[in-house]
Image: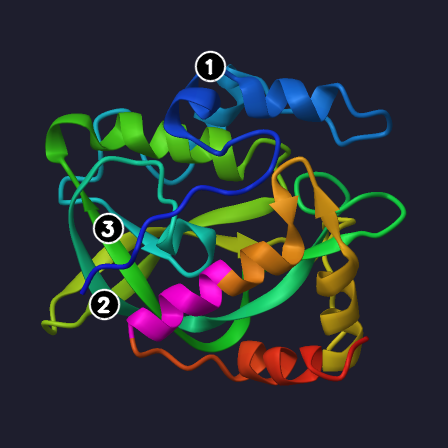
Amino acid sequence: MSTTKKINDGSVKLTRENITQGRLGEKIKSISGSDRVLTKDELITERRKIIPDTGIGEDIYIFAYGSLLWNPTVEYEEQFLAKTYGFHRSFCMKTNLGRGSFINPGLMLGLDKGGSCRGSAFKLKKSDAVKNVDILFRREMVTGAYRPKLLKTKLENGERVLSVAFTVDKKHKNYFGQKDIKIKARMIVKASGFLGSCKEYFDNTLDSLSELNITDTEMSAISKYFEKIK
């Protein structure tokens, strides 16, 4: 089952071209007080911690649970409904940049410890799989806020594979451990940045989950609370 692909509404479009040409990192560098942007060599070093230059000896999949569902920016062969175990989807990463500001920080999704998560797995082409993973690292790991992992993933056809997934780093200063749905909803409604509004990110992700017939408890609760915010 596939999902409708979209591009963000912000002043900087999250496209494959902009990512590979370093425009995302350049924009972050231009914002006073922003986090340090990892160099290309540093990003490759981070990728090599889970995937060597020669690959992993089998097909590589990307596990999508948030914006990758509707804007993957990688070239892939197939998209599968998939599930990972040991982590759950949560708005647990604060952002002062792409979809937030220092005055009104937003919240981004991450995979937090515990439970399981349903989403999509994108099967990469063997010929350029590592190249596409590097592009993904330049997008998701631009400031090193996540902990990339190879997670055991079950596809809708029952096949078990390894997929690249971005989990949260609870030691990172932007980790947001607050569980209060009301606080999260208010932050999401108010926040916007150069990639667009946090609410757009939320809505596009919720639409993609709906297309996959996936119900997310936290996102459903946040969505219902939006109606109470004036």
Q: As displayed, is residue 181 above or below residue 143?
A: below
**Helix, strand or loop at mark 3:** strand
Q: Quadrant of residue 136?
A: top left
Find the distance from the CA under tag 2 to the CA under tag 1. 31 Å
Magenta stretch? 204-212
- Mark 2 or mark 1, which has the lower sequence index? 1
Image mark for residue 113? none
Residue 181 x/y as whole percent: 72, 80
Image quadrant in which the N terminus is located: bottom left
Image mark for residue 21? 1
- Mark 1 or mark 3, which has the lower sequence index? 1
Q: Quadrant of residue 118?
A: bottom left
- Residue at 15% in and 45% down: 59
Instruction: Answer with left or right where residue 140 lies relative to residue 5.
Output: right
Instruction: Answer with left or right where residue 193 lies relative to residue 216.
Output: right
Which residue is identified by label 3? 122
